[in-house]
Image (cartoon, helix red, strand yellow):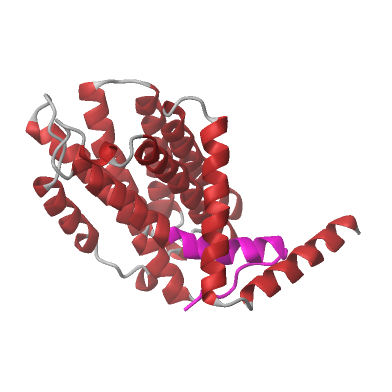
Amino acid sequence: MGTKRGSSRMSVLFERMRKLPMKVKIFCGALLALCALVALKFTITSNYYYFIASESVHIVGIIALIYKLFALKTCSGLSLKTQELTALFVTARLCCSTLTEANIHTVLDVISLLSTLVVIWMIRFKLKSSYIKDLDNMKHYFVVVPSAIVAILIHPFTHHWRVIRIVWAFSLYLEAVSVLPQLRFMQNAKMVETFTGYYVFALGVSRFMALAYWIIQIYETGGTYLFLAGSGYFWFLAAFLAEMVQSFILADFCYYYMKSFVQGQLLRKMPV
């Protein structure tokens, strides 16, 4: 009874928020994000932990997909192309981190890559019959080629080999847009499967943690962090904008999915 009453109150709250003017919604969202940033700034003592938390949440999302594939024996609602793009940018990042400075991020990337490869293997071979290829119609080169071009033009200036610097930038830019095939899939299907929703929501939380690092660094340095000497004329700015792009892409979906989750219902229809 208590759960139903609490769910009902939350449903009424979301319904009232839905009827608010768009400017009020934007203000409330910005205020909530600001409160979260302030809480993170005073809670997390080292900036190093932002990316650890980001990568850990991403792994949790992938584990949710693996559970779905093995328990439900279906890959409906999943974009194979997003998983392949994920494997590509994680591999690129893993190669760079292994050649430069192996640390906890390298371990997390290994776990993330292996988990993603399991998902790809299940979709391509074990559960191929439930994969809807017609809905997964975004071409790889739509996101890979632009990411590669931008990486060649804008990459960090460090003491490492130029190829490594370009590949590192490529992995960051590709990560920012790798979720687009999954969102396109859900728009074509006009629905979101539950565990797929968990995965995309986990991506949203993951990107918010990474974006929080950039925003706090920019605030603490008065904006000069974006143009630090020796890091490329526009590298930090481009990296920050890449995080912003993916965060905005996922923010709209996360709002609608959270509303459905609190109401205790499956998200059946995507916002247009």
The magenta region covers 250-272
Query: Which residue is at 20% across, 55% downward?
Result: 144
Task: Determine whether 159 is above or below 81 in the image.
Answer: above
In this rendering, position of residue 218 left or right of residue 154: right
Query: Which residue is at 17% across, 34% downward?
Result: 231
Quadrant of the snapshot with the N terminus: bottom right
Query: Which residue is at 17% across, 58% downward?
Result: 146
Q: Nearer the viewer, residue 236 or 109?
A: 236
Q: Where is residue 43 in the image (x, y as percent from the top left)?
A: 57, 31
Corner quadrant of residue 265: bottom right
How many discs appear? Answer: 0
Q: Which of 17 and 150 is in front in this view?
A: 17
Q: Does the magenta stretch include residue 140?
A: no
Residue situated furthest front in the rendering: 222
Corner quadrant of residue 140: bottom left
Task: Determine whether 105 is above or below 250 in the image.
Answer: above
- Asked if one can make out residue 77 in the rendered structure from this viewpoint, the answer is no
Q: Nearer the viewer, residue 124 or 48?
A: 48
Task: Determine whether 8 is above or below 89 in the image.
Answer: below
Residue situated furthest right in the rendering: 1
Corner quadrant of residue 114: top left
- Asked if one can make out residue 96 in the rendered structure from this viewpoint, the answer is yes
Q: Where is residue 100 in the image (x, y as percent from the top left)?
A: 21, 22
Q: Where is residue 175 in the image (x, y as percent from the top left)?
A: 31, 48
Q: Where is residue 34 in the image (x, y as percent from the top left)?
A: 52, 50
In this rendering, position of residue 120 left or right of residue 239: right
Query: Which residue is at 47% across, 39% downward?
Result: 59
